[in-house]
Each structure stands twice: as C-alpha cells, then as structure tokens.
Amino acid sequence: MTTNSEWLQVESLDLDAQGVARNAEGKVVFIEGALPGEQVQVRVGRSKNAWEQGEMTALRRESSQRVRPGCPHFGLHPGACGGCKMQHLDAAAQLAVKQRVLEDNLQHLAKVQPAQLLRPIHGPAWGYRYRARLSVRHVAKKGTVLIGFHERKSRYLADMQVCPVLPPHVSAMLMPLRALIGSMDQRDRLPQIELAIGQRTDGLVTALVLRHLEPLTAADADRLRTFAADHGVQWWLQPKGPDTVHLLDAVGPELAYALPEYGITMPFKPTDFTQVNHPINSVLVGRAVRLLDPGPAERVIDWFCGLGNFTLPLATRAGAVLGIEGSETLVQRARDNAARNGLSAKTQFAARNLFELTADDLVAQGAADKWLVDPPREGAFALAKALADLHAEPREGWQPPQRIVYVSCNPATLARDAGLLVHQAGYRCVAAGAVNMFPHTAHVESMAVFERA
C-alpha cells in the first residue's frame, strides 16, 4: 500500500480527471487533484488488489499546466463543490486531455484509428452553462437554504455563493434565491430549481423551474412573482413529472435557441433536452452539416433527432431529411419546429424505438445517402448492429448510407459503435475530434465521420 510519505510520479489523467501514477510496488494509484508530470504525496482512501485511490496531500514538482481555479468552491477541501473537476488545469490542456480520451477509447476499445483528427471545438470557459439542475435544501439546524451542486463525492449540497460556470447574472442570483426559498411557506418541500436560458434578438430569457412537492400557497406564488420582477426571470412550476411543467402566470417570453447560420429558431420548454452550451452547439451543428455535406438531390436520415437540432439545418441543404425519435410527442414538437421555420416540405418525422432497431426497421425507413446519428449516453448500438447485419446479408433494393456523422456524448459507447461500423458494417473512420461542451468537467463530447470502405 502507498505510504503517506512516498513521492509518486503522475503519468496521466483518467476519465474522471484523476492523476494516474504507480507506487513503489507497481500498483496503479488514482490521485484526485494531481496533474501529469507532477510529483505528489497521497492519502489513500480506497485500496483494492489492482489499484488504490486517494487525494493529493503534498506537491513537490508542479505541472506547467496547473492554474489557479476560477471558483472559490473548487478544490479538495471539505465541502468543495463537485460540479467541476478540472479547474486546476489550463483550459487548452483540458481540451488536449479530452482529445486523448477520445483517441484512446477508439484505439483500445474498438481498434479504430481515425484517418484525420479534427480540430477540437471549444469556446468560452466561463459563464457557458445555459442549463443546470440545481438542488435545493433547507438546512433547519443551520438556519439557511443551500442551492447548487453536491459536494465532491457526497450527498450533501455545497455551500455555493457563486458559480462562475453559470452566466454571471445567474451566479449573482444564487444568494437572493437562497433568501427567497428561505422566506417561503413550503421551503421544506422545494427540492430543485432547474435553469434554462433561451436566446432572443433583444437578449436572453432566463427561466427557473421550481419543483414543488406540495401546492404553493398564494403568498409563496406572490413571492415568486416579486422575485421575477426584481431579477428579470420567469418562473415555471413543476408539481410532478416533466410533463406537468407550466408557467407560473399564463404568459411569458418564449424560450428558444437560434442557429443564425441557417436562419433557424427553435422554441423549447425549460425541461426539454437542449444543449447546455449554446455557442458551442452552433459551431457543432455547423461542422456536422459541413462534414455530412448533403447535396440538393440527397436524402438524409437524422437518427435521435430531438427537437430538430440537426434535422432543420440539414434540410436547408439536402433534398429531403427524415428525423426519427423515440416518442410521438417529441416527433410532433420537431414537426412543429420544421413548420415554424418553413421546412415542412423538405422534412418528415417518425417515432421508433431506437434501442431495439433491426435490419428490417432500417429497410422499412428506405435508403438514404447519408446519416446523422446523435444518440444519448447509451449510444446507438442497435442501429450500428442492424447496419452490420445488412452488410452481412444485403437486401435487394436497399443501399447503406455512403457517409455517417456520429455526434457522441460518451466516448466509450462511440468506440463500441465505431468498432461495429468499421469491423462489421463495411465503413472506415475518416475523421474524429473532441468537443468541449462542458469546460472544467471530465465530460467528453465528440464527433466522428464514417465512410463506406
């Protein structure tokens, strides 16, 4: 076991932004707070036969990439916020780490090496988080309310007074929100506030969704209205599941996000899935469309189309686009967005169980020249497997897409699916690159391009 006095040489970072070293016995040690190139001492918290995990207690040789964290709540100290893991690492170095994570997953899990590495997509490192789910807890013993993210490796909430990854006007709202909740009659029955920010030509629309386990009193509703007027936000209420979300009052500015390059605006509800980082999303969409490069006579299928984030921009270039999602409700929302943007004639939408697709399902959708695939963290295994099955046993009249652009939020499931596409479905990986959608976290988004071999 690693002793408290042993100096370890940190070799790399793992997927959770922990330094990776080996002790004198050759055992792998994962070290929170340590960076590659550093010599550190560690206090071991967990020890297994093959590895140990602990926290850095002393630093003898500092990495040139170590920087001062931008948030007072970040670190290894008791009560530190667990929302970010990499604030101590230079932003450019964070990006390099995420690119390496993508490459390592493709190489080691899938035995796939992209022919070209795409330049990583990145943007502002602070104030980028346009969506967030903030926990709320009235701590009666301390006579205060906490609002924010959980402490590092804890079920307790961090005592957050500011949050630099939130937009500045939202960060400045944290303490007033704590005072508001503390003043409410139902303060013990209000577990969550969800943030969603929309874009308008005249500025941002900030929506706060209050989860409440009991009906609000009239006095509490009035307190919310006063806060909204003072801080320029709109309140939505969520008494039960996401489908119960509604505005506190009957009217309010519309939430929407824009893709100016394509002249597209898409409204959304504050509990809809939309990208956390709107500026990066705009760049991501633009690159995906350019890489797919649909022609005016080509048909494209957008698998996991959501509200139409990729479907609608693709429709401005392609001859026809079919967007496929898992629920009829979401499909109708995407259809409405297409109509709003004058793209109904070039788009169709369908609801399918995207995690149980078969070769027959692919044939039923008809051949397409190109695919855009944008799955959740679980990936698109069924889709890739069905494509591999059709490669093994071709169907008359059906042709596989010549190019696939795969947008991923999990490098491990991307690698799994890439292995199927390359080794069993007749494709080669021509390009891949990282997307820093969540600066200062270990979350890796990426994009890969596949073409028929």
Image: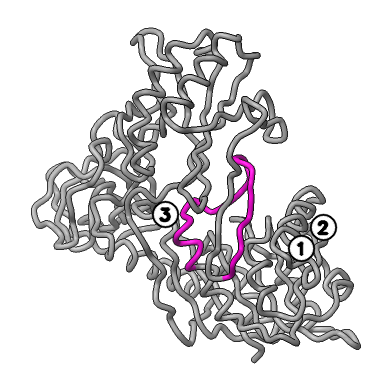
Q: Position of residue 203 (x, y in %)?
A: 45, 48
Asked if marks 2 and 1 touch (Cβ < 8 Å), the reply is yes
- Using the image, tell me which numbered label, if any, was put on residue 145: none
Q: Which residue is mark 3?
A: 438
Q: Which residue is mark 2?
A: 351
The answer to whether one can see residue 355 in this image is: no
Mark 1 element type: strand
Mark 2 element type: strand
- Using the image, tell me which numbered label, if any, was put on residue 324: 1
Q: Position of residue 186 (x, y in %)?
A: 54, 11
Asked if marks 1 and 3 touch (Cβ < 8 Å), the reply is no
Q: Is residue 69 above or below residue 9?
A: above
The answer to whether one can see residue 79 in this image is: yes
Q: Position of residue 421 (x, y in %)?
A: 65, 78
Give the quadrant of residue 178. top left
Mark 3 element type: loop
Query: Who is closer to the viewer here, 265 or 148?
Result: 265
- Per the image, is 215 magenta? no
Give the quadrant of residue 346. bottom right
Location of the C terminus by quadrant is bottom right
Q: Which residues are magenta?
A: 262-283
- Per the image, is 276 magenta? yes
Q: Could you tell me the amino acid type at mark 1?
A: Ile
